[in-house]
């Protein structure tokens, strides 16, 4: 397939059946995403970063392009895209604004993905159309002050009362948590037969959430990274009681693909900036690009980012085929996040003092990329996940 103007066709992997190139309709969508980013995002990214906020109307404009309903079925107002096209779209947004890309990834893969895969038909029909159309924004609330990857430390509780489930507790580092119209909240609902804590998932309207603060962060500053509190909020059980841990682990397998794609986008932005710079920067009467050390540095970055993209597209293709991707999603997110950080560091180093200043976006790329090594499973945790998978160790539930 020939490349279309504005968005070149992706080069397929050696086995194109594993990572097939996007269809013509997918390419047209990606072209629209690219145009949206150039026209609606690039002129404002620095201002959003300084203000530490993305205006609500930006998400409405993103929804008009289809970015709020990428994975939702057409019957629910979404685009029904493949995970591979979703990953390419998040990568493109990430090249322009990491904070916006992270918010869109959390909205699509975590919150809406949880409802689509684990919610009832009634819940899907109620919540997905406004989420896909941008009328509503969502958030996914797992992390707490004392609990992240260690779900056994969860303190938020769900209590069944006469009028239904009531949710109480604190959640921390919740993307979009203060402005969400609906949240999926993970809570402890009792003790299972095996003596372990019973964990369940709930849909909670945003009106039941008490915003505590916007968490000040190193990077992704424009993202609404929130601390929230729930005090007897009305909750609606998602799936079966006690299936919450199984649910959120499967959602994380999908979500990690989005974070991997986001990291690649940020890394590519840094790499492209570095390449343009070393071509025109004169050092000792020669372009900096003539230096073999510089060539080797950027060659390594380019190779790692390409490898990360192939790992990410492999995981996405397996998701599209209905295959489990715990290992593949973890590998993609681990490798992509660390490759992106190395690419950002190289680009900043090659720019010298200019790179360290806020006159250029490189310091923002570096700050934003750093989050990708932590969010949705820190690199160290992902190595444990991968090790369990390759050694065939069953995770205790």
Image (cartoon, rainbow, N blue to C red):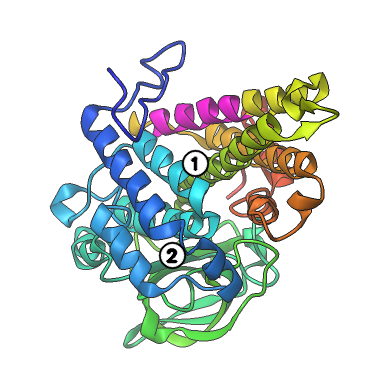
Where does label 1 land, which residue? 257
Query: Residue 111: x and y, percent?
Result: 40, 60
* Residue neighbourhood size for the residue with mark 2, other residues' Cα within 10 Å, grouped as few (<14), some (14–19), many (≥20): many
* Residue identifier under label 2: 201
Q: Is residue 386 visible?
A: no
Direction top: furthest residue: 14
- Name the side, left or right, on which 186 lies relative to 355: left
State the residue in front, 297 or 70: 297
Q: Residue at x 23, y 28 (%)?
A: 24
- Can residue 337 be seen in this snapshot? yes
Mark 1 or 2, closer to the camera: 1
Q: Specify few, some or many for label 1: CA neighbours under 10 Å numbering under 14, 14-19, or 20 or more.
A: many
Give the vertical position of 30 relative to 310 (above or below). Answer: below
Label 1 vs label 2: CA separation? Answer: 22 Å
- Residue 248 among those drawn in magenta: no
Give the answer, above or below, for where 313 lies relative to 32.
Answer: above
Q: Residue furthest right?
A: 284
């Amino acid at each position: 397939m020939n490349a279309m103007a504005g968005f070149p066709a992706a080069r397929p992997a050696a086995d194109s059946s594993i990572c097939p190139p996007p269809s013509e309709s997918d390419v047209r969508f990606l072209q629209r995403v690219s145009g949206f980013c150039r026209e609606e995002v690039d002129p404002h990214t620095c201002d959003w970063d300084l203000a530490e906020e993305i205006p609500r109307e930006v998400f409405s404009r993103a929804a008009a392009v289809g970015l709020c309903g990428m994975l939702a079925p057409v019957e629910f107002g979404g685009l029904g895209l493949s995970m591979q096209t979703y990953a390419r779209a998040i990568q493109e947004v990430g090249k322009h604004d990491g904070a916006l890309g992270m918010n869109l990834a959390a909205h699509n893969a975590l919150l809406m993905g949880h409802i689509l895969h684990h919610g009832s038909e009634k819940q899907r029909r109620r919540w997905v159309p406004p989420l896909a159309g941008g009328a509503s924004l969502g958030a996914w609330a797992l992390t707490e002050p004392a609990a992240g990857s260690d779900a056994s430390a969860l303190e938020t509780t769900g209590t069944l009362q006469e009028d239904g489930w009531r949710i109480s507790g604190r959640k921390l580092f919740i993307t979009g948590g203060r402005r969400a119209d609906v949240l999926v909240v993970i809570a402890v609902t009792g003790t299972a037969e095996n003596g372990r804590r019973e964990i369940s998932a709930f849909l909670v309207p945003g009106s039941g959430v008490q915003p505590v603060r916007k968490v000040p962060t190193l990077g992704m500053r424009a993202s609404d990274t929130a601390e929230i509190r729930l005090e007897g909020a009305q909750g609606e059980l998602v799936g079966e009681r006690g299936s919450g841990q199984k649910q959120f682990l499967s959602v994380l397998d999908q979500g990690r693909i989005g974070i991997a794609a986001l990291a690649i986008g940020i890394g590519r932005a840094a790499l492209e900036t570095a390449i343009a710079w070393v071509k025109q920067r004169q050092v000792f009467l020669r372009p900096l690009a003539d230096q073999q050390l510089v060539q080797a540095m950027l060659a390594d970055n380019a190779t790692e980012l390409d490898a990360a993209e192939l790992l990410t597209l492999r995981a996405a293709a397996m998701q599209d085929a209905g295959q489990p991707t715990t290992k593949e999603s973890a590998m993609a997110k681990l490798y992509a996040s660390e490759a992106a950080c190395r690419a950002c560091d190289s680009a900043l180093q090659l720019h010298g003092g200019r790179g360290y200043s806020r006159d250029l976006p490189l310091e923002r790329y570096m700050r934003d990329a750093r989050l990708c090594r932590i969010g949705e499973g820190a690199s160290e945790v992902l190595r444990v996940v991968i090790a369990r998978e390759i050694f065939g160790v069953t995770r205790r539930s």
